[in-house]
Every structure is written in C-alpha cells, then in structure tokens.
Amino acid sequence: MTTDVNQQRIVELTLLLLAAFITCATVAIAAVGDQVEITWRVAPYLAALLILWAVAHVTLRQRAPTANGILFPIAALLQGLGFALMVRIDPSLAARQTTWALIGVVGFFVVVVGIRGLHQLRIVRIPLGIAGVLLVFLPLISDSDPSDSEISLALQLGPLHVVPGELGKLLLIIFFAGWLADHRTQNTAEFWGETLRIEGDRSRFIPLLGGWLITSAVLIFQSDVGSAAVTFAVFISMWWVAVGRRTDLVLSLGAITATAVLAAVSVPELQNRLTAWIDPWSNPELGAAITRSSFALAGGGLTGTGPGAGNAEWVPGVTDHFAFVPVGEELGFFGAAAVISGYLLLAGMGLRIATKARREFDGVLAIGIAVFLGGQAWASVATTLRLLPPSAMSLPFISINGSALLTWNLALALLLKISETVPEASDQTTILPGIKLEAERQS
C-alpha cells in the first residue's frame, strides 16, 4: 500500500516539475520575442501559479494519496501553456487568470477535502440538477451582449466575466450520474435474472427524454452547435454505459437529428451561424475569426513561429473561444498535436478510471466528466479548424476563461476522488460480489 502511494505521488511530482519547467521556458522565450510586452511584472503571477500547483499536490498527498498521479500534471501543463501563450497576447490578463486559478484551487481543495464520499453528491442530485438547468440557461435572460465578431454565453457581473453554463453542465452530469446509476443497477439485476427485462419498463425512456430536451433547448435557444453536441455526447455516453439498448439509442439519435434539422431551417440565429460557417466571407461579423484563424494556423507550419513570434492577436476571441489558434501558430503542427494528445490522455485516463470504479454512480460520473473534458476540447479545436459552426466553447485549461477554469478544476478533483483506491473495498464495482457468487455456484 505504502509503495503504491509513494509511486503515485512521486510520478505526480516529477511530471509537475516538468510542467513547471516547460511553462517557465515558454514564458521566457515569449518574453524575448519581437513586439511582445511581457515584463517582469508577469513573474509574480507565474510564481503564484506554480505555488498553487504545489498546494494542490500537497493536498492530494495528504488527503487523496492513492489518487491517480497523471491527471493533475496533464491539466497543469495545459494551464501553464495557456498562461504563457495568452498572457503574451494580453499581459493584463495575468492578474485575472491568476485570481481565477486561486479560486479554482480553492474549489479543488473543497472537493478533495470536503467530499469524503461521492455518495454525498448522489443524495443531493435533484437540487444539483435544478441548479444546473438554471445556470445553463441563465445567459439567455442577461442584458450583456457580445461583440459583433464574437459569440459568448457569459454574464457581466460588474468587473467579473462569468460563464455559468460550464458549471451548470457539470452539475447536470452529477444529476444524470445519480439518475442513471439506478438504471445500471437494474440492468445488472436483469443480467442475473433477478428482475424483468428493462424493455418492459417504460420509465427507461425518461432519462432519454430529459437528455433530448436539454440538448434541444441548448441548440434552439442558444444556437450553439458545439455546446449542444458536447451536451448530447456526454449524456448519451453515460446513458449507454448505464442502459445500453441499441433500439433506444437509434430512437434517441433520430430524435436529436430531427431537432437539429428543424432548428437549422427555423431558427434565424442558427441559420446565421451556419451561413458564416459555410461561407465566412459573406458574414464579416462572425466570419472574421474563422478566416483569420485559418491564415494564422497556416503560418505556423510544422514547427511553428515560436512562442511570442506569432500574430494571433488579430483573431477575435483568440484568448478564449479560438485559443487553439496561438497554440497551432506558435507551436506548429507538432506542438498542436502534442496538446491534442494531452487532451486525449486526459479523457483516456478518465475512462480508465471509470472502468475501475467501485460503485455504479462513480463509474457513470467518471464517464460523464471524461467525455465532458474531451468533448469540450474537441468542440473548441473543431470550431477553430472550421469543422463546426462558430461556437462559444472554450479550450479546457488553456483558454483565459476564469469561471470555466473553476469548473474544470472541480471536474478534475472529482475524477481524482473517483480514482482513489481503498483496501477495504477491493471489488471494483458492486456487481463483482454477484459474479463471484455465481462462479461458486457453478463450481
């Protein structure tokens, strides 16, 4: 046990030191670039970021010693690269991002230390679900308007620029995990012949109906294809793991496809975004970011212009929705591929944690969080590469989006809590005792 604990934390510390070195080196290289305004005033904020990583590492060592040792360093490296590339574009963002990083670490600490058992979240899943729906659609009643060339789902609360929808989605993931865990238990009971087949229970359609309604509302009322795609992907992944009925899956895919087609022909704002996506030159307001990002990415080539040598600042939304542009331009194809590999590893580790979860709720929750982080990264990159219509999706841990950074830290902390191993509960899921019992009967 002690060996496993030491190994996980030693791996984490080693990777964190590597992430810190890459971050400092990137900032230093960017600072000596032409026409770059990074000065020594950024150094305290960079030091504060490294101290926050150290605090998070010590917290895991003390409170979750057996948690996965790779997840946090990957997130730290992505955040460090984001800090280096975005701050050189606008050095005034350093203070704001460091402040939100502090808030994110506080949230990380609250989850790791304050939540002793994830069953506590399952108990309050209904209030969390209601809060999630309210947060997702709160921007619709806001009077704040984004700039003409940028799409935003943010609220302007005085000096604060808050995106409540990200936290709302995480709360909905917790709600659906608690809901679908019951169906997974019923599915397991059906396998052992302890209950009737799920096909005879029409209540199985209620989660599908709920997921379809929320996804459709995001698509119709927010006209954000990327956000709707991620929401649906998260829900359908969790549902498939919990229930796994092919006929129901086909019906769900048909329903969301019909909704998308109906929205595309009847929602003017969505039509406007689709037009800008198909022909950016015909829509200067929304198309400016698309066309300019294409030129910036092409200028990066295979090896990139180098940190601080790019011109991505002329792309609208470059520090948030189009944060992948400076990554591709200054780090090149190879650097961008490495960043994408980081997201794949982050999502892959989340899925691996889900397979080793000891309880149904933990496993379904890990699936949702892994797809949430990976899907959001995919949607942001796809928007930049013009594979999706203009979207308000932020690139996890890289974008200068403070409130979203808080959500990503909370999601990461939940994954780390799920990854903990407890000697007294060696069975990975609650169905394993049943499997052992059945094996003993057959023998």
Image (cartoon, rainbow, N blue to C red):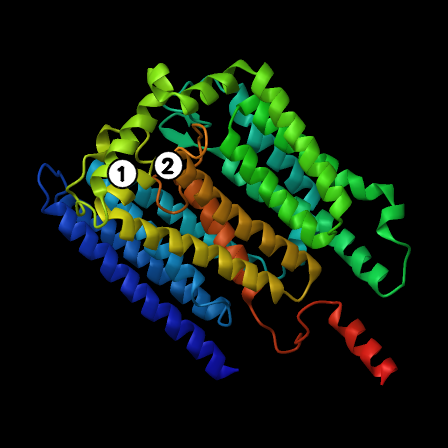
User: Which residue type carries mark 1?
Assistant: Leu
Label 1: how many Cα within 10 Å (few below 14, some 14–19, many 20+): many
Q: Position of residue 257 (x, y in %)?
A: 64, 31
Residue ID at (19%, 34%): 311
Left or right: 105 with respect to 428? left
- The number of numbered badges drawn on the structure is 2
On-image quarter of the C terminus: bottom right
User: Which residue type carries mark 2?
Assistant: Leu
Residue ID at (21%, 50%): 303
Which SS class for mark 1?
helix
Q: Which mark is residue 362?
A: none
Q: CA distance from mark 1 to mark 2?
A: 9 Å
Residue ID at (52%, 30%): 225
Quadrant of the image occupied by residue 193: bottom right
Label 1, on which residue?
A: 297
Left or right: 49 with respect to 220? left
- Judging depth in this view, the residue of 207 and 310 nearest the camera is 310
Residue ID at (83%, 62%): 191
Kindly indicate whether the residue at mark 2 contacts the one at mark 1 (C-beta within 8 angstroms).
yes
Q: Position of residue 78 (x, y in %)?
A: 34, 52
- Judging depth in this view, the residue of 35 and 43 nearest the camera is 35
Quadrant of the image occupied by residue 278: top left
Label 2: how many Cα within 10 Å (few below 14, some 14–19, many 20+): some
The tag earlier along the polypeptide, 1 or 2, is 1
Q: Is residue 148 visible?
A: no
- Judging depth in this view, the residue of 386 and 342 nearest the camera is 386
Label 2, on which residue?
A: 385
Which SS class for mark 2?
loop
Q: Position of residue 333 (x, y in %)?
A: 28, 48
